[in-house]
């Protein structure tokens, strides 16, 4: 993992720890208008942006070079109050065309995985580390991840999921700030700022390695169990 990715992952970890310390209910993202004035007016209660506000702030994003090749921004979708959030790597061909996360072959498998624990796609929230498709589905680069990261953090703060399922190596290593292989990371919860992160294999990997579906099923059962008390 290179230094920029490490730095971004560090930001995420520090931010989530901050959320925890703050008690997660009343949270940051103080809007410009809410900042204390020079005359020292009392600080109003900090506000979290809603998903709609975050989407508006993102706009027709040109913060990185992917804007030149993408068709559509894939912001994320699902229940704004989801207890369970899935985070993948970034949009592929189908997602770029439709503007929705996980709608291609891997996405269809993710839908089945969600339904296997008696939830529907609409019950959870699905997003990615980056919101625009890299050309030829290459790995996202640090200068693409960095400007995107604050928006994912704001989405997490708005949704306040109890559990984040990190799909695949890239999402898991980014969220957990580690270089450990997904095969060693998966199957365990990692507490980051009061949110439980469960890394598991990416559905695209499962399409190539169907024998690993059993592992994902084991991970999903742990998530389902944890959701009972969430
Ligand atoms: N793979 C991902 O990581 N995310 C998507 O949205 C689709 C495929």
Image (cartoon, rainbow, N blue to C red):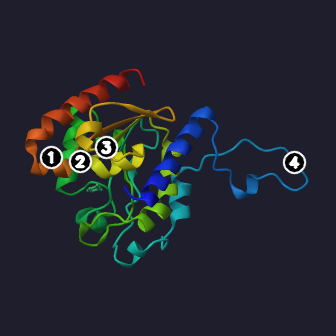
Viewer-nearest of labels 4 and 2? 2
Q: Which residue is mark 2?
A: 202
Q: Are marks 4 and 2 in contact (CB under 8 Å)?
A: no
In the rendered image, is residue 68 in sight?
yes
Q: Which mark is residue 180?
A: 3
Q: Earlier in the sequence, mark 3 or mark 2?
A: 3
Element class at badge 2: loop
Viewer-nearest of labels 3 and 1? 3
CA distance for labels 4 and 2: 49 Å
Q: Which residue is mark 4?
A: 41
CA neighbours of label 1 inside 10 A, class few (<14), some (14 to 19), many (20+): some
Q: Which mark is residue 206?
A: 1
Element class at badge 4: loop
The C terminus lies in quadrant: top left
Q: Are marks 2 and 1 in contact (CB under 8 Å)?
A: yes
Viewer-nearest of labels 3 and 4? 3
Viewer-nearest of labels 3 and 2? 3
Please tell me which residue is depicted at 36% across the width and 69% down the height of the picture: 72
Nearer the observer, 18 or 183: 183
CA distance for labels 3 and 2: 15 Å
CA distance for labels 3 and 1: 19 Å
Please tell me which residue is depicted at 50% across the width and 43% down the height of the picture: 13
Residue 62 position (above or below residue 154): below
Element class at badge 3: loop
Image x and y of residue 23, in percent: 61, 31
Quadrant of ligand 1 in image: bottom left
């Amino acid at each position: 993992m290179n230094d920029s990715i490490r730095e971004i992952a560090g930001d995420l970890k520090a931010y989530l720890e901050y959320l925890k310390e703050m008690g997660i209910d009343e949270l940051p993202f103080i809007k410009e208008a809410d900042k204390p004035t020079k005359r020292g007016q009392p600080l109003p209660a900090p506000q979290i942006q809603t998903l709609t506000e975050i989407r508006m702030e993102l706009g027709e994003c040109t913060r990185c070079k992917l804007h030149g090749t993408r068709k559509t921004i894939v912001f994320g979708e699902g229940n704004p109050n989801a207890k369970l959030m899935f985070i993948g790597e970034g949009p592929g061909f189908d997602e770029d065309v439709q503007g929705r996360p996980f709608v291609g072959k891997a996405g269809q498998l993710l839908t089945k995985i969600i339904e296997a624990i008696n939830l529907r796609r609409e019950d959870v929230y699905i997003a990615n580390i980056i919101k625009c498709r890299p050309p030829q589905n290459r790995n996202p680069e640090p200068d693409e991840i960095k400007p995107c990261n604050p928006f994912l953090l704001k989405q997490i703060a708005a949704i306040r999921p109890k559990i984040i399922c990190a799909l695949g190596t890239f999402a898991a290593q980014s969220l957990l700030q580690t270089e450990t292989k997904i095969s060693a990371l998966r199957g365990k919860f990692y507490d980051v700022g009061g949110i439980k992160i469960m890394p598991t294999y990416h559905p695209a990997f499962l399409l190539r390695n169907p024998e690993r579906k059993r592992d994902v099923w084991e991970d999903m059962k742990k998530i389902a169990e944890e959701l009972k008390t969430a």
